[in-house]
Amino acid sequence: NYLNARIRSAKKQLLDKSTYERLLAMDLNQIKNWLLDSPRGIDIQEGIAAQEGPEGLERGLSKHMERTYRRLLGWAGDDAKPLIEAILRRWDVHNLKTLIRGKFSGASEEELLAACMPACDFTWEELAELAKQPTVRDLINLLITWNTNLKRPVQQNKEFMASGQREALTALEFSLDNYYYEIGMTHAEELAGDAEPVVYLLNMEADIANILTILRMLNLEERDKMKSFLIK
């Protein structure tokens, strides 16, 4: 179908092993020039205009990934789009976790954005606006005014997050992971057999999230609460 044809065409732009070997033999300036001459050139130019050094290249590559994901969503029909969004939304969860953790630890705006990857609901500009907020409470207050699917789990934990307790961060991260899994499975179940690969991926990500939760909580006083933070 149309979507598969467009994906097969886009796949040709992926780098092969020999290209990576050539890039590994280059210095940073040579890599920059190679990227500028590639299909990623426009985004790389934008990245290095915003930041110098390797950070600018990383920003440009992230921008290119964002543009690629937007194109993919644009190609998808009504049946496929919810499933693609279900997969890409894990980046939205990652971005929110990164921003909120960073606010807890006092990370700078630049550090926060360097760890983000816009993919589904959030653009670079929106992530930058969230990163500018001085506190976790300000970030959450701004987020819940937006039309985003992840507003619900954040809003449910708003008062708890305002306490500033680390336990509140654990609770919010679980709510985000759980919501991502639930909404993805809901879309997948609507398409039954056609969504088997997506169901497999979502289950695998739920397992990974649970393992990471267990590892983080092994030596904490809240260990007895561990089961309440596992995705069922």
Image (cartoon, rainbow, N blue to C red):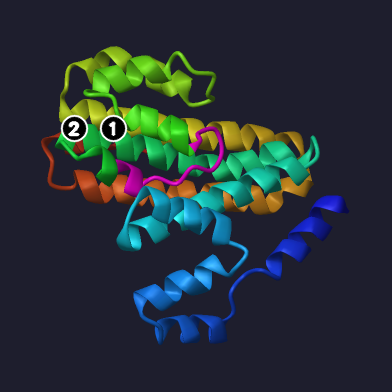
User: Do we see residue 178 in this rendering?
Assistant: no
Where in the figure is residue 31, as x and y percent of width and height? 44, 74
**Circle 1 — which element?**
helix
Q: Are marks 1 and 2 in contact (CB under 8 Å)?
A: yes
Q: Quick check: is 122 in the magenta stretch?
A: yes
For label 2, the SS is: helix
Residue 26, image quadrant: bottom left
Q: Answer yes or no: is residue 10 visible.
A: yes
Q: Pointer 2: what residue?
A: 104
Chief SS of the magenta region: loop
User: Residue at 70% across / 51% down in the picture?
Assistant: 196
Is residue 27 shown in magenta? Answer: no
Q: Residues within 10 Å of mark 1 (few under 14, many from 20)?
A: many
Q: CA distance from mark 1 to mark 2?
A: 6 Å
Amino acid type, mark 1: Ile
Residue 24 location (% of width, % of height): 41, 83
Question: Image point 26% across, 46% down: which residue?
Answer: 111
Quadrant of residue 161 within the rendered picture: top left
Specify whether 43 is left or right of 74: left
Q: Residue at x 31, y 62 (%)?
A: 53
Q: Residue furthest front?
A: 49
80 and 145: which is toward the camera:
145
Residue under label 1: 100
Residue type at mark 2: give it: Phe
Image height check: is 1 above or below 143? Answer: below
Position of 36 relative to 164 (above/below):
below
Horizontal and vertical percent position of residue 225: 23, 32
Magenta stretch bounds: 112-123
Tell me what residue is drawn at x 33 percent, y 57 percent.
55
